[in-house]
Amino acid sequence: MGIRKLLGPSFIILALGLGSGEVILWPYLVSNYGLGIAWGAILGLAFQFFINLEIERYTLVKGESVFVGLAKLFRGSAHWFILSTFLGFGLPGIIAASAQVLASLLGLASFKWLAVFLLIVIGLILSTGKTVYGIMEKITKVVLAIGVPFIFLLALFLSTKADWGTLFRGLGGQGDGYWFLPSGIGLATFLAAFAYSGAGGNLNLTQSIYIKEKGYGMGKYAQKIVGLFRGQKEQKIKLEGEEFVVNEESVTRFRSWWRLVNWEHFLIFFFVGSLSIVFLMLLSFITVAGLPSNVEGIRFVINEGTVIGQRLGSIFGCLFLLAVSVMLFQTQLGVLDSTSRIMAENAAIIRLKKMTNRTVHLSRFYYYFVWAQILFGIVLFLGNIYEPKTLIVLGAVINAFAMFVHTGLVSWLNYRSLPLAFRPRLWRRCVVFLVFVFFGCFSTIILLNKLGLFTVNF
């Protein structure tokens, strides 16, 4: 398979991060603390690059998701993934942010009902189409192809040589009067941004599901989730993968696939992701850095639109806000799709343990969770719990701990379940172990800090 035909899953995982870390949290931090923290965004992306590839490794070899494999090794893992996914991503902060930005563009005083409407629209989009993956891939490619270049051009046009110098120093950890972390930065917000450099939380695990649906490696033999309104009453799907003989031919094929998925993920997820987050941070710095109102939720985004409109003309300010709103909407669409896939597959795993017939109605489970999350979000909005930044940061802290857990579990799964020829090399295991320790330590510090048992001052 050529690299062009291989493109797809990394577009989705990249887009999942655009609306949380790239568009919101890192630019928010930059608007308040400058570009000296830019190093954290790139390091976070690098961490997730290696995490995602180890997730893909298992499915390339086994033709089944990591959830199926983990359920064979760890009793109760399916229940954990349902609970942690719903807690981490059921909080609808991203769509609230999209609605707030769009409401400011439309001149609406409140965005609560607009957020409710957008959630329902997402549910309808995911409930149509021949296959859900096909819809997601098409929408994602269009949004990234239009929105990201527009952001790039704005940043290039408005920036100066001095701004680029500040950015490059920030990538090395040098800020205005500090190294790496500025005084007064919120530790939870920084961890949230770090965890969302990319998808974050259990969303990384959907790489396993997406490459199975795309047909990479042994995923060629897996089936797809069909649309809810396609006229098919039942779709029984076998979750387990296929076995094969480990010989020179199978090892050669794996290595060929491995090279391709590494290139695909590096080019789309890491390279394009790095460019996206760098330009978004730079745009935030050159337009609104230091404005007092930046600390108020996601007000800095609206400030950016105002400043861009003042410098280039109101039409460009409006187009920027529209692009941000659409990118956030697309991210929430992708999050709902991915989290519903995670919870559906794990619910199916639980159900299979109680059945003699080794097939399940996976599509039905998927749509239960899609609409359950939408209803949960609507309930929160109607209860006046809809401040975007608060919801995003809370969810991201939960997801940082979830990343600590699944990084360790997947590493152990690959060590225990894969034949020796398909296991990661020592240097990759060391990198993933470093990621595991980082998120474990950081999550522990945040928990102790919130409990008042440990104080961190920068």
Image (cartoon, rainbow, N blue to C red):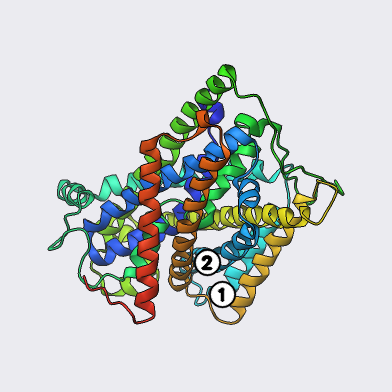
Residue tagged 1: 112
Instruction: Please name the residue shown 53% across and 55% down the image.
Output: 202
The residue type indicated by label 1 comes to Lys
Q: Check disc 2 and report its element: helix, strand or loop.
A: helix
The alpha-carbon separation of the residues under discs 1 and 2 comes to 8 Å
Q: Which residue corresponds to the image point at 55% horizontal and 63% vertical from the top-left? A: 89
Which mark is drawn over residue 266? none
Q: Quadrant of the C terminus?
A: bottom left
Q: Nearer the viewer, residue 350 or 378?
A: 350
Lateral position of residue 211 relative to residue 195, left or right: right
For residue 99, the mark is 2
Instruction: Characterize the local packing of mark 2: few (<14), some (14-19) or many (20 or more) Cα atoms within 10 angstroms.
Output: many
Along the viewing direction, whichever of 430 and 319 lies nearer the viewer: 430
Type of amino acid under label 2: Ala
**Residue 197 screen position, x and y as percent:** 40, 53
Instruction: Answer with the quarter of the image where residue 114 lies.
Output: bottom right
Across and down, in percent, residue 431 comes to 36, 44
| Image coords of residue 383 (percent x, y) | 59, 82
- Vertical position of residue 171 compared to residue 134: above or below: below
Q: Is residue 305 visible?
A: no
Seen in the picture, residue 213 relative to 301 is either above or below; the reply is above
Q: Residue at 49%, 58% (x, y): give it.
A: 405
Tell me whether the residue at label 1 lies in contact with that at label 2, contact meaning CB atoms closer than 8 angstroms: yes
Q: Quadrant of residue 442?
A: bottom left
